[in-house]
Image: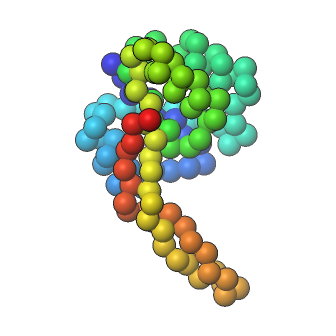
Amino acid sequence: MKTLVLMNQQHSLFPIQEELLNQKFPGWEPVFIPASGWSLEKQIHFCKEELQGVGQVVFVSPVPYILARLSYLSGQGRPLAVYVFVNDKRVKKELPNGKIIQTVASDGWKLVLI
């Protein structure tokens, strides 16, 4: 069964994320969501029509309806695993104006089954 990785076309994977995907799901396929997002109708169509032969879906970028729908379907016994990337590690950065912010680290990523 194939693995789809959903991500906004403006996002990119950290090397550790690609490594995790390649180790766990060799041959995974990216599905790029336009920067403007998908309409609800497109998300419903994706869930109904484009998941034939898919065993796993990994969310890099949130697509709320699809995430909720696939989680529901997997809970109803459909043989579909839903994963998300999780990173609890933060890095402090100082902006040019002196403000300090925290961002997600490039390392420390985990693939978690919902």
Which residue sits furthest bottom? 98
36 left or right of 49 in image = right
98 left or right of 85 in image = right
Residue 98 percent coordinates (x, y): 66, 87
Residue 65 percent coordinates (x, y): 65, 29
Q: Residue at x 34, y 41 (%)?
A: 21
Which residue sits furthest left? 23
Q: Quadrant of the N terminus?
A: top left
Residue 111 percent coordinates (x, y): 37, 44
Q: Residue at x 69, y 31 (%)?
A: 38
Q: Is any atom of residue 16 visible in this view?
A: yes
Whether residue 52 is situated above or below residue 39 in the rendered picture: above
Q: Give the number of callouts.
A: 0
**Quarter occupied by residue 49:** top right
Q: Is any atom of residue 15 visible in this view?
A: no
**Quarter occupied by residue 79:** top left
Q: Residue at x 37, y 50 (%)?
A: 110
Q: Residue at x 65, y 24 (%)?
A: 43
Whether residue 7 is situated above or below residue 69 in the rendered picture: below
Residue 58 percent coordinates (x, y): 45, 35
Q: How is the image coloured?
A: rainbow
Foreground residue, 48 or 7? 48
Q: Quadrant of the C terminus?
A: top left
Whether residue 19 is situated above or below residue 82 in the rendered picture: below
Whether residue 1 is situated above or below residue 98 in the rendered picture: above
